[in-house]
Amino acid sequence: MSTYTQSMIQIVFSTKYREKTLIKEHRDELYKYIWGLLKNNCHQYRIGGIADQIHIATHIHPSVSVADLVKDIKLASSDYIKTQNLFPHFGGWQSGYGWFTYSFRDKDHLIEYIKNQEKHHNEKDYMTELIELLKEHDVEFDEKYLL
């Protein structure tokens, strides 16, 4: 028998100290680079974000560890940002990340959500959004650790 999977996930991570260093004019270049990192082991649906965070909607291959994937994205993209001087004030990524699963039926909604991050964050800051995601996915957390 073959292996069949459907693991629609959203990965969210922020810049270190949530500094707003990802200037708009170079974000697409960063997203294309991350897209290239994902193309071998993942089916990408959308990458987006704002000045202090990135959201990735993807389906990962069952042999891929999400923790390793996020670590690889952060390390490689940090090097890329520095060598290309994309974001002069970029100080790195935060140490943690959010990883949330979705039904494939929610794919279009998730893609639109990520596509509209600029508009969405006119109404909510990163912390409010993160807390809503954690609650929506029934993730227990202590606010003092949400740096």
Image: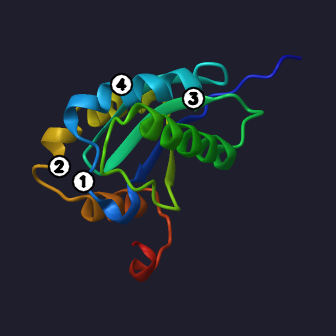
Quadrant of the rendered image containing residue 31: top left
Q: Earlier in the sequence, mark 4 or mark 3?
A: 4
Residue 108 image point, x, y percent: 35, 25
Q: Point out the residue furthest to the right here.
A: 1
Q: Earlier in the sequence, mark 4 or mark 2?
A: 4
First-in-chain label (2 vs 1): 1
Report the residue marked by disc 3. 59
Q: Quadrant of residue 125?
A: bottom left
Inspect the image, locate mark 3, and give the three-letter code of the amino acid beneath it. His
Q: Which residue is mark 2?
A: 121
Assign the N terminus to one quadrant of the image: top right
Q: Position of residue 88 (x, y in %)?
A: 31, 45
Q: Earlier in the sequence, mark 1 or mark 3?
A: 1
- Within 10 angstroms of label 4, few (less than 14), some, or many (20 or more) residues? few
Q: Is label 2 or label 3 in front?
A: 2
Residue 114 x, y percent position in the rendering: 31, 35
Q: Residue at x 74, y 32 (%)?
A: 62
Disc 4: which residue: 29
